[in-house]
Amino acid sequence: MSERTPSITWPYAVIVLIVVGLALAGTEILSASRAYIGGQRHWSKAERDASAHLIRYGASHLPSDYRRFREALAIPGGARRGREARDAKTADPRAAYDGFLSGRNHPDDIPRLIRLFRLSRNLPFMRDMIEQWAKADEWIDRLAQVLERLPEEIRSGSPEPGRIPVAVAEVRTIHEAIVPLENRFAQTLDDLARLVTRIVHWMLIVGAMMLVVLGSAITRRMHARTAAVSRALHASERRVRAEQAQLRHQANHDALTGLANRRHFEERLQEVLSAPREAGRSDAVLYLDLDQFKVVNDTCGHPAGDELIRQLSGRLRGLLRRSDTLARLGGDEFGVLLEHCDIDAAQRRAEVIRREVAQFRFAWQVRTFSVGASIGVVTLDGSMSTVAEVMSAADRACYAAKDKGRDRVHLFRLDDLELQARAGEMEWVARIARALENDSLVLHSQEIRPLRAAADGGPTESHLELLVRIVDEDGSLVLPMAFIPAAERYGLMPRIDRWVIARAFSELRALRDRSGTIPRCMINLSGGSVADPSLLAFITDRFAESGLPFDRIGFELTETAAISNMAVAKQLMRELRALGCPLALDDFGAGMSSFAYLRTLPIDYLKIDGHIVKDLLDDPVNRAMIHAIRQVAEVMGVHTIAEWVENGRMVEELGRLGIDYVQGYGVARPLRLADALADWQARPPLPRPLLTGQPG
């Protein structure tokens, strides 16, 4: 029930209760009046009967007439006793009741007679009635006196002549005197009854009018409230519809740019792919990836990057038709669905977009930036039937444009060898993910051995470089060169590096627990891991968990990783070096510009790039480069490591050049780490130099 219902119904209830109460009161008064009228009727009849019996008695002298007179006279007497008991200063309800009952009043009416008297004894009509009643009782007393005299005359046997006629005449006189009093008493009661009837009628009329007025007011109020509720409901419905529309918009649009999001774009693309192909119809998809966007983010922060995206989105809208769908697919990636657009028109539109992005200049505070766009184009000619196929093809075409130098358009073709290679990398991404999930990676290691003994000026011991392989579904091993490029391109190397670190610490801890010591091991870190600010905490946590000594586990960074993340790499290397971890710079020497930054890096080992080492026997330039690197390293107090060493002649030549360590198939082939550690535990932990004597 509504909380407002009582406020609506209580006025009705009050009015109805008042009307009913007044009607009951009026009915009670009418009933009491009727009782008085009935009592008056009994009183009047008894008075007439008494007079008639008395007159007959005077003539007949029969005891029966006398007895009837006495019986009739008892009725007014009883009424008188009831009135007097009721009127007394100390009312006697029982005596009043018995008196009125003797006056032939109905027992149910007697309480009404008494109540009406008590409530209205001071009202004019009641005072007048009592006055008439009292006068009539006085005449009844005279009638009783006549009765007392007649029996004496009759019993004497010799009444005086004329005495009985005189008495009879007196009785008639008394009766004639009482009749007007009776009439006036009855008239007063009739007037009272009519008054009460009119009052009750008017009360009912007024109550009905009040109910009508109140009902009308409440009806108007309810109509107003209903109208207000209806307006509120309509407003609520409008708000709900607006919120639903907003939610649908938010679900289908990018919050930053207002463009369609990936979900909506793919839904629209699915509609196009599912629609019946009309003869000659051609549609196309463009996949845009901004070039140099990371520079803006890294230089000025994400607010600047967001503003660049917003401004560029507005420009792209202006280059497209109303029927085209432009969407933001990711951070700096956009998609365009060109409906009813052949491949030539799609390429022209892509070129227009590319030029617009290239000409766009983004100003942020005091800086100005230019960006580019690599765009992949895919025609929807029926050769691809799913959204996943189209988006994969467009993504591969876009990255092919990046691989060719960025800021260009590349058209997807099924026979495109570059895209086939990209598709192969995408397959590797899935295989790598499965290998990480299923723990299908395995650690190998390759020994890095010193060329000379410590007594001849060489390093003190050999150490191990840790390598990772994938165990394929058929149990064969997949070498890093097959999956590392895809892992690096698609950002999976940090996960692989962390797996390697965790597994290496686990196996080395087990060896330490068995033998009390472990060999020095070097773990490779990719460029993605170097740029990861949480890597150092991950490494220090592994040291804390395992209790392994810092100086027994080192890390290798490639020259490319160090250069591309120079500031971050230097910070990471300093912190690892401060812990006591050995550090190596891998693949050094691809360009002589490497020497420019070498002095700023805190390293312990310099690994010469294998492309330089492998031709040292036939190429004097390579020998000279190796010699120069060795001289710089010696000045810096850094040990040198030559990799890709395939035979003994290379070992001897590298010894003459003063190289400290060698690594390669001509020195030691890679082994499963578990086997290598078992071998290391079985032999004395002493250096095993390949050459003797001083270099040169």
Image: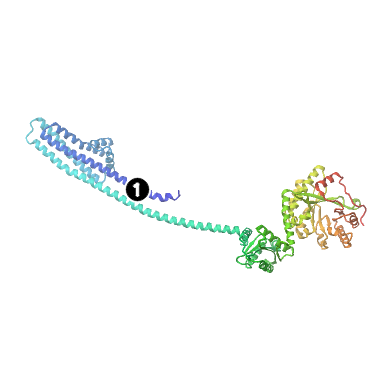
In the image, what residue occupies the spot 74% across and 61% down? 418
State left or right for residue 23 relative to residue 683.
left
State left or right for residue 642 relative to residue 236.
right
Secondary structure beneath dot 1 equals helix
Which residue is outermost to the front?
Answer: 279
In the rendered view of the protein, which quadrant contains the C terminus? Answer: bottom right
Which residue is outermost to the left?
Answer: 161
Determine whether 323 is above or below 195 in the image.
below
Residue 573 in view, yes or no:
no
- Between 207 and 389, the one lying in front of the other is 389
Task: Identify the residue position indicated by label 1 in the image.
Answer: 18
- Image coordinates of residue 377 in percent, x first then y, are 68, 64
Label 1 Cα crowd, 10 Å radius (few <14 / some 14-19 / many 20+): some
- Image coordinates of residue 695 in percent, x first then y, are 91, 56
- Between 403 and 91, the one lying in front of the other is 403
Which residue is outermost to the top?
Answer: 156
- Image coordinates of residue 68 in percent, x first then y, are 16, 34
The amino acid type, in three-letter code, at marker 1 is: Ile
Residue 442 in view, yes or no:
yes
- Image coordinates of residue 540 in percent, x first then y, are 75, 50
- Between 72 and 410, the one lying in front of the other is 410
